[in-house]
Image: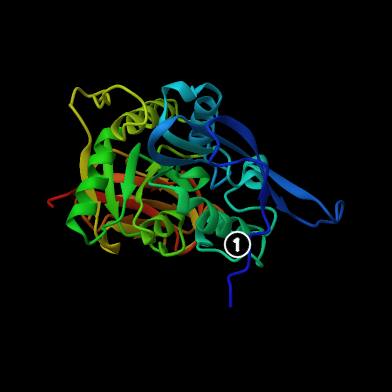
Amino acid sequence: MAAAPSRITTDIDWEAPGRQAGYLRAPLSRNTSGWGVVEIPAVVVRGGPGPTLLLTGGIHGDEYEGPIALSELARGLDPAAVQGRVIILPAVNIPAVMADTRLSPADGRDLNRCFPGNPRGSFSEMLAHYLDAVILPMVDASLDLHTAGHSGDSIPSTNMHDLGDPERMARTMAAAAAFGAPYNVIFSGVDEGATLTSAVERRRILSLGTELGGWGRVSIEGLRIARRGVVNLMRHLGIIEGEPDTRQRDGSPGTRHMVVPDRDCCSFAPAAGTFEPRNLVGETVRAGEPAGFLHFVEDVDRPPLRVDYRRDGVLWMSAGPGRVARGDTVAVVMTPYRG
């Protein structure tokens, strides 16, 4: 039986030369519009022969640096300067972007847990399927810009998975080094199989993600790194001319490769409460030291509960300050990558 076609349509001709700006139109029947659609902004810039790079932002709606940086790029990228094709989707999950939420208000789903998707499924499943089945077959490299959103903070970094293939690992790590964030993190998350990154990797396409800040605000430094990193990656791939600028604010010449090899790098909240972190992301921490304290402000005589780090290293991500639920990750520690 043939796979069901996507329900999403567009007037964009992905193969045409020059610059096109338009929308992906995803049907969404709702109380006020039985035949309504959601318009997802899209820009494609095609110049001479070369690779195709997919740039995505706004997979989660409360992560701002990607949509800002990619919208700027989409307005200014000159086809005459491009060798290859750049597909820019600056605000993929536009219902969540407009609502300032991680989950899509269209169906309450996390788009980045819906891949490879389902053309007959809910809004997020339908959108994931379009990206996986229609967009990715055109792509040679993918950069998916994220932050920690409202749920935490992150030191600006690129990230990737351990691909189990020396050639693909070297190629991806070279692209991460060219992007030029302070860190590149090789990690295994709690639930990675249904992410866009995993969908890209299943097709053996070069895949990079980012974490560029969080805590529900636009990170000035994260946005600077995003703007520079996108240009750096296009230079590295030969899509535009120039050499990547990978110099770091601390004077170091380039990216530090790190790893989060297992869940011992994560500290979890054993109860619901108000989490007080004890370190800023980027600081060196040690196993047995407090990652922070859970406060039970609704229980006047209940003392706070200490949550420790379980691994020496550098703090990659930190929750809060704010409310956390039992089982939430409150700290993630990374260690130097040894190859």
Res. 115 visible in picture = yes
Where is residue 108 drawn, in percent x and y?
65, 59
Where is residue 82 drawn, in percent x and y?
42, 27
4 or 99, which lies in front?
Answer: 4
Q: Above or below — where is 189 with respect to 53? A: below
Q: Quadrant of residue 109?
A: bottom right
Residue type highlighted by circle 1: Glu
For the point 52% across and 59% down, the residue is 133
Residue pointed to by mark 1: 125
Where is residue 38 drawn, in percent x and y?
72, 47
Q: Quadrant of residue 267?
A: bottom left
For the point 19% across and 53% down, the residue is 167
Where is residue 32 drawn, in percent x and y?
87, 51
Q: Above or below — where is 188 with respect to 149? A: below
Q: Quadrant of the N terminus?
A: bottom right
**Horizontal side, residue 199 vs residue 285: left or right:** right
**Horizontal side, residue 310 vs residue 72: left or right:** left
Q: Above or below — where is 166 with respect to 92? A: below
Res. 181 visible in picture = no
Circle 1 — which element? Answer: helix
**Horizontal side, residue 226 vs residue 185: left or right:** right
175 or 189, which lies in front?
Answer: 175
Q: Which residue lies furthest to the bottom in this view?
A: 1
